[in-house]
Image (cartoon, helix red, strand yellow):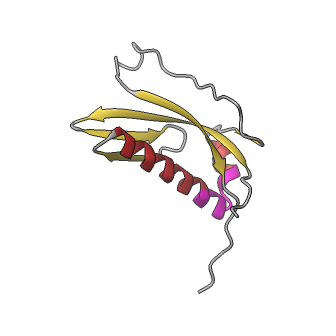
């Protein structure tokens, strides 16, 4: 049975089709990936963000990182997420797709002894 998350963090995922491929980036963490299909990039980016959160927690850096980057989190999964997005004219008429997600903050993993 998986351990209970420490909380939930609201993140903004941005997707754009550039030069024949999809590019995805988590705006708050600067985690990014690319691929041939939007679904592939959505799946990969979500997994990479979860891994990024795990690594921050394992290194005991999450609290500092969240504070430094003004990232807030909730004790419980929220019913809805609200994000601020740039107006189209400010974004340079971008055709970017934005997705707000509330992802679990994983607990620190036990160190592996070798």
Specify the segment rendered in magenta. 54-63
Residue 67 placement (x, y as % from top left): 68, 43
- The residue sitting at 38% across, 27% down in the picture is 96
Q: Residue furthest right?
A: 75
From the top left corner, tell me how far across and down residue 77 is, in percent. 71, 39
Residue at the image point whose x is 34% and y is 17% from the top? 93
Identify the image quadrant of the N terminus.
Answer: bottom right
Image quadrant containing the C terminus:
bottom right
- Closest to the observer: 61 or 34? 34
In the picture provided, is 32 more to the left or to the right than 63?
left
The residue sitting at the left extreme is 20
Residue 8 rendering spot, x and y as whole percentages: 69, 43
Asked if residue 32 is positioned above or below residue 58 in the image, the reply reads above
Q: Is residue 31 left or right of residue 94?
A: right
Count of numbered tags: 0
Looking at the rendering, which quadrant does residue 73 occupy?
top right
Look at 47% across and 29% down and name the residue there.
98
> Residue 34 placed where, x, y %?
33, 46
Q: Is 34 colored magenta in this rendering?
A: no
Q: Main secondary structure of the magenta part?
A: helix
Q: Is residue 31 visible?
A: no
Q: Is residue 68 visible?
A: yes
Q: Residue furthest front?
A: 1
Of residues 40 and 57, the one nearer the viewer is 40
Q: Is residue 93 left or right of residue 62?
A: left
Q: Residue furthest bottom?
A: 114
- Write the residue at 42% across / 46% down: 32
The answer to if 55 sits in the magenta stretch is: yes
């Amino acid at each position: 049975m998986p351990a209970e998350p420490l909380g939930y963090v609201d993140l903004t995922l941005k997707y754009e089709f550039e030069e024949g491929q999809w590019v995805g980036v988590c705006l708050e963490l600067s985690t990014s990936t690319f691929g041939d299909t939007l679904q592939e990039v959505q799946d990969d980016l979500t997994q990479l963000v979860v891994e990024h959160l795990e690594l921050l927690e394992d290194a005991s850096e999450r609290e500092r990182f969240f504070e430094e980057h003004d990232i807030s989190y909730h004790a419980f999964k929220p019913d809805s997420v609200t994000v601020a997005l740039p107006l189209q004219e400010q974004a340079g008429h971008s055709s970017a797709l934005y997705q707000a997600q509330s992802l679990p903050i994983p607990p620190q993993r036990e160190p592996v002894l070798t």
